[in-house]
Amino acid sequence: MRIDWDRRTCARRGHVTYLPQEDALRARLHAATALGTAWRCLRCGDFVLGEPHGSGPAADAPLVPRGKVLRDLFILRFLAVERAIRGVFIVLAAVAVWKFSNSQDAVRRFFDQNLDVIRPVARHFHYDLDHSPVVGTIQKTFGYRHSTLVLVATLLLVYALVEIVEGVGLWRAKRWAEYLTVVATAAFLPLEIYELTEKVSWLKIATLVINILAVLYIALAKRLFGLRGGRAAFDEERRSASLLEVETSAGMPATAYHGGTGRPHDLGERTDG
């Protein structure tokens, strides 16, 4: 079933109406009814009773994402939330490594003492703790130097910062964040594939699939790196989408709506979604 992104968003956030100063355009955007004056929503196109939410020159009207632009913005924000959540978990991991580096000896003693306690229980269930890969990995970390653990914690924090910056930028639909997400995510794909060759898990597979789809979607849908016409085609697509309602209702060319400049808005700079 096809989703009407315009009406879905208006139902959640309300309509967006505007009173332009231009007489011809104003006549196309309002209607007199028995219940009062109604203004056409710049997002879904429905007429809404009541005073307009803003007024002024048409060129200063809020840029309201609609249609495919609105759908793309929804997907970007889904990716933004995923990046932000991942960044938070990486920060927690970095804090854990840093605390471990400052109390390594105490943690080692605690681990060894409890290992002796649970060894008989594990032997009862025919599990050899002395040859356990998990126990071996934990014991190996006790041999790491303090400086090495601090370096790992620092690298994790840097990685988390990149993820959080990506999330904020994608949420605000910034084009630089789209480039950053594609480059940073693609750079880690070989590492994720290598980890799968070491040990397969559903979490690793899901993460790899999400990252591959994110790279392909953003690069193609946003026309990055010159793909599908590059930035010029991207701006033209967004300009025609954002002005479609005004053009069809007013019967005016896009250049007239922008005061004759024909300058497209940048969805990454002004959005009202």
Image (cartoon, rainbow, N blue to C red):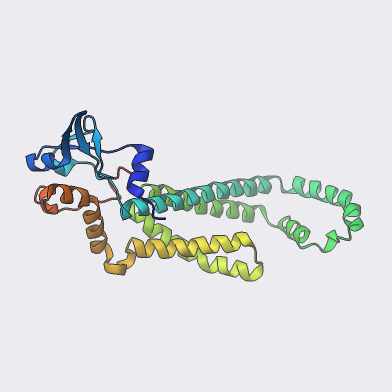
Percent x, y of residue 251: 12, 50
Residue at image location 85% in from the left, 48% down from the top: 113
Q: Quadrant of the N terminus?
A: bottom left
In the displayed structure image, the side of residue 125 where residue 228 appears, left or right: left
In the rendered image, residue 158, in percent from the top left (x then y), is placed at 50, 52
Quarter of the C terminus within the rendering = top left
Q: Is residue 125 above or below residue 16?
A: below
Q: Quadrant of residue 177?
A: bottom left
Residue 73: x and y, percent?
A: 36, 51
- Is 55 placed above or below 8 here? above
Q: Is residue 228 visible?
A: yes
- Please tell me which residue lies in front, 21 or 153: 21
The structure residue drawn at horizontal position 32% and vertical position 47%, both measured from the top left corner, is 6
Q: Residue furthest bottom?
A: 197
Residue at image coords 59%, 51%: 153
Left of 24 or right of it: where is 224?
right
Q: Residue at x 28, y 45 (%)?
A: 44
- Please indicate, yes or no, whether residue 258 appears anywhere in the rendered image: no
Circle count: 0
Q: Position of residue 88 (x, y in %)?
A: 54, 46
Q: Nearer the viewer, residue 199 or 97?
A: 199
- The one of 15 and 100 positioned closer to us in this rendering: 15
Residue 196 is left or right of residue 4, and the answer is: right
Q: Is residue 232 left or right of residue 95?
A: left
